[in-house]
Amino acid sequence: MDQIRIDQLTLKLSGLSEQDGRRLALRIAEGLSAAELSTGVAQSLAALRVRIADHRPAGAGRAGTGHAAADVDGLSQHVVSEIIRQLKGSL
């Protein structure tokens, strides 16, 4: 894969603990590093914005519940997919 450099990753989240937020950022970075991107993806983008609606069942993934890890993994997959989609669409 070509190199992806992210200068800043800002997450505006509600319903996740600080620890889960950090884990989410790490999972996003891991997902992007493992992503298969073809040569020729956008050379430079000033910013990408990813919005993901809250798709959790009521109470799922909030601090103190048993669903936080699964939510973080699922949310990170959605974010990585959307970032890759936008990168590929910017050619």
Image (cartoon, rainbow, N blue to C red):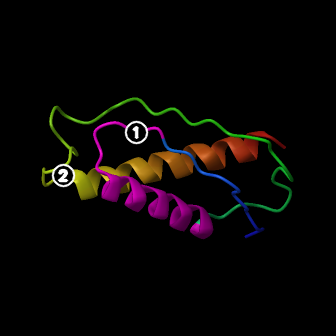
The quarter of the picture where the N terminus appears is bottom right
Q: Residue 67 — which label?
A: 2
Residue 37 spot, x, y in % from top left: 71, 61
> Between 53 and 16, which is closer to the camera in this rendering?
16
Q: Earlier in the sequence, mark 1 or mark 2?
A: 1
List x then y, in percent, for residue 35: 61, 64
User: Which disc is residue 13 wearing?
Assistant: 1
The stretch of residues the image draws in magenta is 12-34
Left or right: 36, with 26 as reference point: right
**SS of the residue under disc 1:** loop
- Identify which residue is drawn at 84% across, 44% down: 91
Give x and y (percent) for residue 53.
Answer: 40, 29
Magenta stretch: includes residue 17: yes
Q: Residue at x 36, y 57 (%)?
A: 73
Q: Dominant secondary structure of the magenta stretch? A: helix
Q: Amino acid at mark 2?
A: His
Q: Is residue 42 magenta?
A: no
Q: Quadrant of residue 36?
A: bottom right
Residue at 51% across / 32% down in the picture? 51
The answer to whether the residue labelled 1 contacts the one labelled 2, judged by CB atoms less than 8 Å apart, is no
- State the residue at coordinates (31%, 33%): 55
Please give left or right for residue 21 compared with residue 47 in the image.
left
Classed neighbour count for the residue bearing mark 1: other residues with Cα under 10 Å, few (<14), some (14–19), many (≥20): few
